[in-house]
Image (cartoon, grey):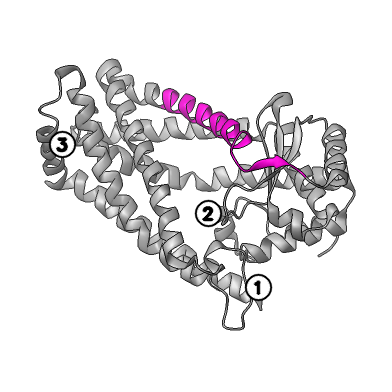
Amino acid sequence: MNESRAARYQRLRRRAEAVSAAAGALLLVACAATPAGEWLAAWARRNAAGVPAPWRAVTEVALFVGLLALALEVLAIPTVLYLAAKRRPSSAGRPTSDSVARPGFEGRGVLSAQLQTAAFGVIAAVIVGMVVHVAATETGGWWWLTTGLTLSVILAAAVRGVSTLIARAGGVQPLGDAGLSARLSAVSESAGVPVAGIFEWRASDDETHSASVTGFGRGRRVLIAPELVRDWSRDEITVVVAHELSHHKHHDLIQSLILDALLMSAALAASDAALWAAGIPASALTALPLIALTASAIWLAATPFRHALSRWQERRADQFALAVTGEADAFAAAVRRVGDRNLIEDRPDRLTRWFFHRHPTIEERLAMAGKR
């Protein structure tokens, strides 16, 4: 029953996200191919007129991109609320661990979380817009390469900064189960990935993460969600942590960042070609919607390659966890728990796997453990 509900939810999710993406693309097309882009640029220039000359151009970019990004985030809100409603418990009363299924949360909590996400999205878009503008102004025809390299460095720094912030965040406390802590420390040593400690992360009431390994080198920390500590067996927690340790041992994050950097530069190069064909200088405000539209199209087309790398990394991490722990039964139980919690369909078709799945299917993961 859960499998059919999961398949139905994932199908609805894909359709809703496709509609949301199409709406966003239409907005970018309108700004790139109609007077709407000029109107928005004129509005930004008017409101930045009083800013001193050295900062005026940057302020214009911030206003132009900020308003456009805000509009895109607003378009995404209906999709978020719709999918949240679909994740509520079924009429039969089967609960999910999604935050919207918790009493008192519902749409208000989902909307609050989306507003926080939107704020980060707008800030990120403004930063990208400024990088593009400065690169186009200072490096001319090589703006796309300069932008790609700069954004790659910013992304890598942000990922490392987030890892450090999470490791030092409030709500992180030493794991109370001394036996489990000792076992996980032994697994980390056996895996060749030393950690500074094992912690329980009570970051928020609605968190849905399971376990993660943050930080770098001997400063790594294992963070475990309260749900796992409360409801999962020690064996299940151990295989999940071993899986996460594999990503650090094999430098999976660095591999993903390198691929993303290459694809980002290729997308920006395609954007430069689109600007040349349209006769728009890269330094113009009206160039930004066309850059975003072209780069997004290239990024979407490259999704199968990015997800293929992710699935290969996740498959290797599964194999690593099984080899290090030898807990095939616990591995299978953990896979089923995660699938049930996140409403993951067991047997998606090939096209769905290419464009939407970063992990091997549940069926493939269970077969790997001999528990299919």
Asked whether the viewer can see residue 332, the reply is yes
Label 2 CA crowd tier, 10 Å (few <14, some 14–19, many 20+): some
235 displayed left or right of 80: right
Q: Nearer the viewer, mark 2 or mark 1?
A: 1
Q: Is residue 152 magenta?
A: yes
Q: Residue at x 61, y 80 (%)?
A: 93
Q: List x then y, in percent, for residue 138.
A: 28, 16
Q: Which quarter of the rendered picture does the N terminus lie within? A: bottom right
The alpha-carbon separation of the residues under discs 3 and 2 comes to 37 Å
Earlier along the polypeptide chain: callout 3 or callout 1?
Answer: 1
133 displayed left or right of 48: right
Number of numbered markers: 3
The alpha-carbon separation of the residues under discs 2 and 1 comes to 20 Å
Q: Residue at x 62, y 42 (%)?
A: 309
Three-letter residue code for mark 3: Ala
The alpha-carbon separation of the residues under discs 3 and 1 comes to 50 Å
Q: Residue at x 47, y 35 (%)?
A: 263
Mark 1 — residue?
3
Of the pair 251 and 236, the residue shown nearer to us? 236
Q: List x then y, in percent, for residue 134.
A: 29, 22
Mark 3 — residue?
44
Task: Report if the CB atoms under discs 2 and 1 are less than 8 Å apart.
Answer: no
Three-letter residue code for mark 1: Glu
Q: Residue at x 15, y 20 (%)?
A: 52
Give the prevailing secondary structure in the magenta stretch.
helix
Mark 2 — residue?
355
> Start and end of the magenta stretch?
148-175
